[in-house]
Amino acid sequence: DGGITQSPKYLFRKEGQNVTLSCEQNLNHDAMYWYRQDPGQGLRLIYYSQIVNDFQKGDIAEGYSVSREKKESFPLTVTSAQKNPTAFYLCASSPSGTVIEKLFFGSGTQLSVL
Amino acid sequence: AQSVTQLDSQVPVFEEAPVELRCNYSSSVSVYLFWYVQYPNQGLQLLLKYLSGSTLVKGINGFEAEFNKSQTSFHLRKPSVHISDTAEYFCAVSPSASEKLVFGKGTKLTVNP
């Protein structure tokens, strides 16, 4: 079945540690996105990529980094510079990198700080 | 900058009652409008979308929404809700020909027996 796979489902980070969240899609979509979800805050855009080897900062990129070396993969690294990383992270994709007609979402990763 | 306001953070209703979840957006340009639903600990699923054409849009699970350009609103409605409709609902907007989607803060719908 086509879709978006996020792993792991739950992740724990120690102080000063970098952690990487995985996002893979087999939909052959050009664009991929990372959102952060906090209770009562809705979804906020961290980074997005419209094509391979290119990505742009979203509204809350500080403390995060991404790469887009392959069309199907868009991993997110939460660095030690992100002082409040506890949140639910959602990856999404869209067929087009220029006009959004629909976003397809993964099932999310819950990141917590030990 | 584009913004989306969902006027109610929580909406409790009884089973089989009608429900309306309100959404207003700020924009003076042509927009695409969306409603997504999120069940606990899951990703978001598209309920319905307005891109152009008829202002009354029908979606999955019996939901519908009406685009009102003069009031910059896109309210979601269902004439009779079920327990299984309990979830969080997000309104989102994208200026047409934009690569970004802006989400509201969500409305938690709780359907009680």
Image (tube, rainbow, N blue to C red):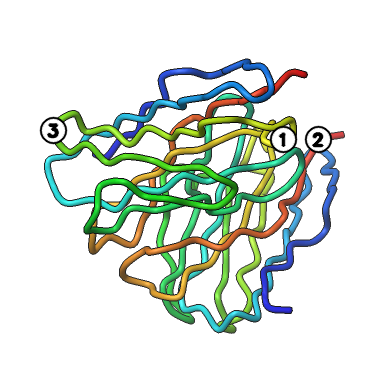
Residue B89 position (above or below residue A51): above
The structure residue drawn at horizontal position 62% and vertical position 30%, both measured from the top left corner, is: B81
Q: Are marks 2 and 3 on the same chain?
A: no
**Which quadrant would residue B70 be assigned to in this image?**
top left
Circle 1 packing at 10 Å, graded few (<14), some (14-19), many (20+), is some
Q: Amino acid at mark 1?
A: Thr
Q: Amino acid at mark 3?
A: Ser
Q: Nearer the viewer, residue B85 or A54?
A: B85
Left or right of B27, for residue B86: right
- Please give the chain letter of the residue carrying mark 2: A
Q: Do circles 1 and 3 both sit on a common chain?
A: no
Residue at which label 2 appears: A113
**Which chain letter matches label 1?**
A
Q: Residue at x 63, y 52 (%)?
A: A90
Pointer 3: residues within 10 angstroms few (<14), some, or many (20+)?
few
Q: Mark 3 belongs to which subunit?
A: B
Q: Between disc 1 and disc 2, whose residue precedes?
A: 1
Instruction: State the separation of the CA atoms marked 2 and 3.
Output: 46 Å
Residue at x 84%, y 41% (from the top left corner): A14
Q: Where does residue B91 sit, x and y in percent of width and height?
A: 44, 39
Task: Tell me where residue A77 appears, x and y as whole percent.
Answer: 66, 57
The nearer-to-camera label among 1 and 3 is 3
| Residue placed under numbered mark 1 in the picture | A86
Q: Which residue is mark 3?
A: B70
Residue B94 is left or right of residue B39, and the answer is left
Do dots 1 and 2 share one subunit? Answer: yes
Determine the residue positioned at 46% across, 27% down.
B21
Q: Are marks 1 and 2 in contact (CB under 8 Å)?
A: yes
